[in-house]
């Protein structure tokens, strides 16, 4: 006689929670409350007699028993998803793109109308989020993430090798000059997740810069602050590009260096054959090639005492 199976819903909730490592992120993906996720996990643990997670505040980690269960569940859950949904539903005509605001504004929106005209059957849903959400299985979902190295568990495509520059309004740059050593600390804008160290260490400055200006956690907001004359901002060249072309901003220093972080397109390996993902991947990797020539134009602006830009490969 076969043993009774646990509720499928509890297994789905467990898989999402295990993938995210946080119950609140699993709740967001499944459009549940966190308390419902907790109850379903508790129900599954009571049913199995196993401790599936160890709790560390808001973060949870799979126990050995939880890891074993997850490894056994992946294939059956994917197979069940394919059995329940038709191939067209599984492949989907709506592609969700999880990304940062800066990536949406610089990499996607300027050329997105071209994609819509070429592929009117694919509906795009662009979701801006700072959290690095784990991607759900068998759904038309991709992520454009800004990172130093791609996630080894995901299929990744390098979109651009970005550069770092320091920018300011023409008036402010004229006032402060182009010698970084003389810039006042209070006039140097800070990004919460991207400090000045890569830019400063890649040139021969007599000493490290003291950076103590306004701080922002968003590259676009920081750039807007620079355009308002609130200080000199460290910026990715791709983000500052349009403002530099319009002369709203100018380089505060001719030094340009390779960014240690770059934009990657990522998706789950089990979603690689979904037509919408294949189509978008082919388009975006081609569309972003325009940045290669744009960014290289600024390499020659780098000051003579800067280190030679290291060539990177995709």
Image: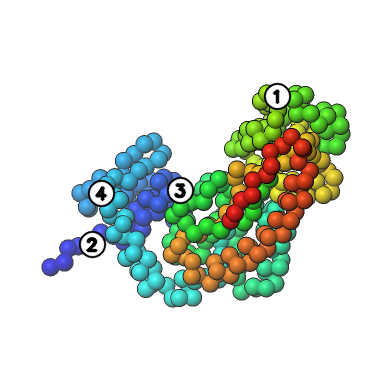
Q: Residue at x 70, y 53 (%)?
A: 106
Q: Nearer the viewer, mark 4 or mark 3?
A: 4
Label 3 sits on a secondary structure element that is helix
Tag 1 secondary structure: loop
x and y percent of residue 308 in the render? 69, 42
Identify the residue position indicated by label 2 in the image.
5
Count how many numbered circles sit on residues in the image.
Answer: 4
Which circle's residue, 3 or 1, is located before the other in the chain? 3
Estimate the spatial distance between the alpha carbons at disc 2 and disc 1, rounded to whole Å.
Answer: 68 Å
Dot 2 or dot 1, earlier in sequence: 2
Pick the quarter of the image with the C terminus: bottom right
Q: Measure the C-alpha gap from mark 4 to mark 3.
A: 22 Å
* Quarter containing the N terminus: bottom left
CB atoms at circles 3 and 2 under 8 Å apart?
A: no
Q: Which mark is residue 25?
A: 3
Nearest to N terminus: mark 4 or mark 2: 2
Nearer the observer, 214 or 25: 214
Q: Secondary structure at mark 2?
A: loop
Where is residue 152? Give x, y as percent: 46, 53
Q: Nearer the viewer, mark 4 or mark 1?
A: 1
Q: Is residue 265 left or right of residue 14?
A: right
The local secondary structure at tag 4 comes to: helix
**Residue hosting label 1:** 206
Residue at the spot 79% in from the left edge and 35% down from the top edge? 252
Q: Earlier in the sequence, mark 4 or mark 1?
A: 4
In the rendered image, residue 58, in percent from the top left (x then y), is placed at: 41, 39
| Distance between the alpha carbons at the discs numbered 3 and 2 | 26 Å
- Mark pair 3, 1: CA separation: 46 Å
């Amino acid at each position: 006689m076969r043993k009774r199976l646990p509720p499928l819903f509890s297994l789905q909730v467990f898989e999402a929670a295990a993938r995210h490592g946080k119950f609140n992120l699993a709740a967001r993906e499944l459009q549940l409350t966190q308390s419902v996720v907790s109850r379903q996990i508790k129900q599954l643990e009571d049913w199995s007699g196993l401790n599936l997670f160890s709790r560390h505040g808001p973060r949870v980690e799979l126990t050995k028993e939880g890891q074993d269960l997850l490894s056994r569940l992946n294939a059956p859950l994917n197979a069940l998803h394919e059995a329940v949904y038709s191939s067209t539903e599984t492949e989907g005509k709506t592609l969700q793109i999880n990304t940062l605001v800066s990536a949406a504004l610089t990499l996607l929106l300027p050329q997105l109308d071209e994609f819509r005209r070429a592929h009117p059957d694919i509906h795009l849903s662009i979701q801006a989020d700072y959290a690095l959400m784990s991607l759900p299985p068998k759904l038309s979902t991709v992520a454009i993430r800004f990172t130093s190295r791609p996630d080894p568990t995901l299929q990744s495509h390098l979109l651009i090798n970005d550069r770092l520059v320091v920018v300011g309004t023409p008036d402010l740059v004229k006032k402060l000059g182009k010698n970084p050593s003389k810039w006042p600390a209070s006039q140097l804008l800070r990004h919460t997740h991207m400090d000045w160290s890569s830019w400063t260490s890649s040139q021969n400055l007599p000493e490290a810069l003291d950076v103590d200006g306004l701080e922002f956690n968003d590259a676009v907001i920081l750039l807007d602050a620079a355009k308002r004359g609130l200080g000199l901002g460290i910026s990715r060249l791709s983000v500052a590009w349009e403002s530099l072309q319009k002369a709203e901003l100018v380089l505060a220093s001719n030094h340009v260096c390779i960014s240690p972080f770059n934009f990657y397109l990522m998706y789950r390996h089990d979603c690689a054959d979904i037509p919408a993902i294949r189509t978008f991947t082919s388009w975006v990797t081609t569309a972003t090639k325009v940045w290669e020539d744009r960014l290289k134009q600024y390499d020659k602006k780098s000051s003579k005492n800067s280190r030679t830009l290291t060539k990177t490969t995709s």
